[in-house]
Image (tube, helix red, strand yellow):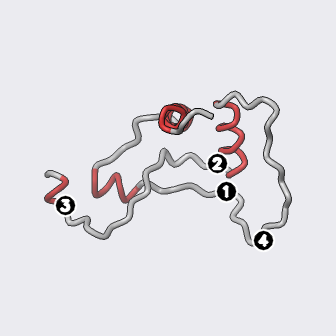
Amino acid sequence: LEMKDLPIQGEAFNFSNEIQKTALEIVELILDLMGCKGLRPEILRQASNEIPKQYLSAAKARKILSWDHQFSLEDGLRKTISWYKDFLPKR
């Protein structure tokens, strides 16, 4: 079965390794991977109705597209950071 044969027009998919992380954990991991030793987010605690932990389910992508992740979260972030460093102009 090829992608052109799948009835997926208008469908939305999540692509994830389904590891539950808080937004703060993700930010801290990105900062660490970028070598930002002294930079830490300022937590204001002003938001209401926040979801403490959530993750993207890739079940639909696995079922319909036979998709599975190829990278760990850290490896994917490293590749993303590298792409942005190459893509964005140096300042």
Q: Position of residue 91 (x, y in %)?
A: 63, 34
Whole-number angstrom distance, CA of label 4 to CA of label 3 = 41 Å
| CA gap, disc 4 and disc 2 | 19 Å
The residue that label 1 is drawn on is 53
**In what element is the residue under mark 4?**
loop
Element marked by disc 3: loop
In front: label 3 or label 1: 3
Return the mark for residue 48: 4
Q: Residue at x 28, y 49 (%)?
A: 66
Q: Position of residue 32 (x, y in %)?
A: 69, 31
The answer to whether the residue labelled 1 contacts the one labelled 2, judged by CB atoms less than 8 Å apart, is yes
Label 4 amino acid?
Ser
Residue 54 in the image: above or below residue 25: below
Q: Is residue 68 left or right of residue 89?
A: left
Counting residues from the start of the chain, the first of labels 1 and 2 encountered is 2
Residue extending furthest toward the front: 91
